[in-house]
Amino acid sequence: METRSPREDGQPSPARVRPGGPAPLLLQTVHEHRPGLGGISVLKTRGTVDASNARLFSEALAEHVAHAGQAGEHPLLDLSEAYLACADAVRSLDRATGALAHTGRALSVVQPRPHVREALTSAGLPGIRVHATLASALDALTSREPGRERACQPACEPARPDPGGLG
């Protein structure tokens, strides 16, 4: 009988985390038009973000945010089917949303799993806002006054759940 010990870095082997290793990272962009809001662009993330693909995830997310800005759409990130496996995964979000944070804006992150929500809240990333549902994220976007997104310094706390949402 074979016993598995943790890897040298203290993490369990991928086989113990998920049979067959971590779930592959899949990214899909969905564009929609919402009355009263305009265009939205949702980057749906499925699978595991880990050290091996965190850079790819960060680049794809930064590209998503930039493209949405050029197209006049509201960017959103759906993490309902994602797992952040390491600190590199959280840092990848920070890198991708840093430009938004510098302008006082933030990316709406929708439906993160509880462990992801906790990691994002603990990290206190200034470039993201966590929402329990897509509807609550869209409500928050609809209720913003023009230009308010750039001006909300102390009122918009980093990586906090929306008032009626997750926490």
Image: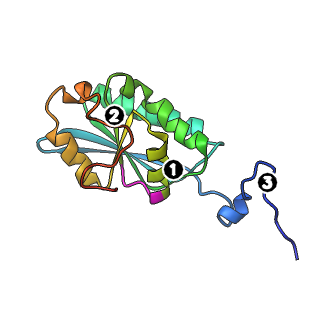
Quick check: is 99 in the magenta stretch? no
Give amino acid for label 3: Arg
In magenta, the rendered stretch is: 110-114
Image quadrant where residue 66 sits: top left
SS at mark 3?
Answer: loop
Whichever of labels 1 and 2 marks the residue nearer the N terminus, that label is 1
Camera-side mark, 1 or 3: 3
Q: Say above or below: 60 vs 122.
A: above
Residue 163 locus on image (x, y percent): 25, 50
Q: Is the magenta stretch mostly helix, strand or loop?
A: loop
Colouring style: rainbow
Q: Say above or below: 155 vs 167.
A: above
Disc 2: CA contacts within 10 A as few (<14), some (14-19) or many (>=20)? many
Residue 45 locus on image (x, y percent): 46, 50
Residue 111 has which mark?
Answer: none
Give the CA distance from mark 1 to mark 2.
23 Å
Q: What residue is drawn where x is 39% and y is 33%?
A: 127
Residue 7 has which mark?
Answer: 3
* Marks 1 and 2 in Cβ contact (< 8 Å): no
Give the CA distance from mark 1 to mark 3.
26 Å
Give the CA distance from mark 2 to mark 3.
36 Å
SS at mark 2?
Answer: loop
Residue 25 is left or right of residue 11, and the answer is left
Residue 34 or residue 97, whichever sits in front: 97
Image quadrant where residue 23 sits: bottom right
Camera-side mark, 1 or 2: 2
Which residue matches tag 1? 26
Give amino acid for label 1: Leu
Q: What residue is drawn where x is 42% and y is 54%?
A: 112
Residue 166 locus on image (x, y percent): 33, 56
Disc 3: CA contacts within 10 A as few (<14), some (14-19) or many (>=20)? few
Which residue matches tag 2? 106
